Amino acid sequence: MSNSSIDISIMLSTQFHDLRRAALSPNLFPIDLMDETVIRDKMNEIHGNINLKVYRIHFAPEQSVYEKLQLEFFSSLDAYETWFDTHAYILEGSSGPTLCDIQLFSTLVRLPLVYATLFRVSYKALNESTYPNLCLFVKRMYDNLPNIQAVVEIRGILTNYYTSFALTTKDGKKTVPMAPVCLIERNESNGPPLRE
């Protein structure tokens, strides 16, 4: 038994592998194609340097720690930006997305929505001029990975984070911001229209 998000992701991708519909759900943990240790090591790297780092930035106890964590986080993004100059996916030799790609995608899609503003992960902006390859990666994952559009709900992301972490107004209400222009195209499940 484990409550590790990495272990749970791997379990869902392996133990329930036979229940997936191959056409609709790619093999995200392809141990038949590559060493499991390689996949796990990369997942741990992404988890520590990207996924958890945004929370460590948000809860930094002092300015110097906050600034150090920001530089580390964006250094990691810079490395992935360079990687995607010559690769479509995170794992060397992968012909399709893996759990590693899902891990990176999940943080990148939230970065301009909530992490940059609410968590103050703001040293650089995630946009097409600063990180063109990462933006292309996010779009590619969103447009091409089966079922991903059904679970990425922009309005839901904003509502969840801004009602969980944001300060309340004088009358006790929590304000959920309008969605910024986003890396992914708007669809009806994303809620109210995005700024045009």
Image: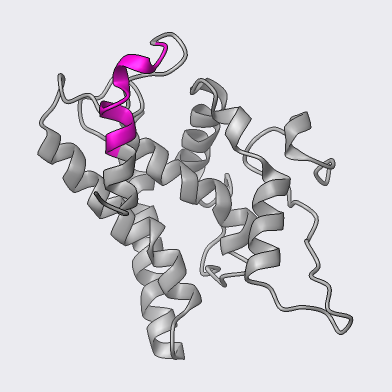
Number of numbered discs on residues: 0
Image spot of residue 177 (x, y percent): 78, 60
Range covered by the magenta-colored residues? 10-21
* Left or right placement of residue 45 versus residue 50 in this view: left
- Is residue 27 visible to the viewer in this orientation of the structure? yes
Tell whether 196 sits left or right of 180. right
Q: Residue furthest right?
A: 171
Q: Residue at x 57, y 24 (%)?
A: 143
Is 139 situated above or below 32?
Answer: below
Q: Is residue 5 left or right of residue 58?
A: left
Instruction: Specify the farthest residue to the top.
Output: 23
Q: Residue at x 34, y 50 (%)?
A: 5
Q: Quadrant of residue 83?
A: top left
Instruction: Specify the quadrant of the image occupied by residue 163.
Output: bottom right
Q: Is residue 185 above or below residue 1?
A: above
The residue lying furthest to the front in this view is: 1
Q: Position of residue 108 (x, y in %)?
A: 50, 49
Asked if residue 164 is positioned above or below residue 160 in the image, the reply reads below
Asked whether the viewer can see residue 85, the reply is no
The quadrant of the image that shows the C terminus is: top right
In-image side of 116 versus 63 (left or right): right
Q: In this rendering, is residue 150 above or below 130?
A: above
Is residue 75 part of the magenta span, yes or no? no
The quadrant in which residue 103 appears is top left
Residue at point 51% right, 37% down? 138
- 15 falls in the magenta region: yes
Main secondary structure of the magenta stretch: helix
Coloring basis for residues: one colour
Q: Position of residue 130 (x, y in %)?
A: 52, 52
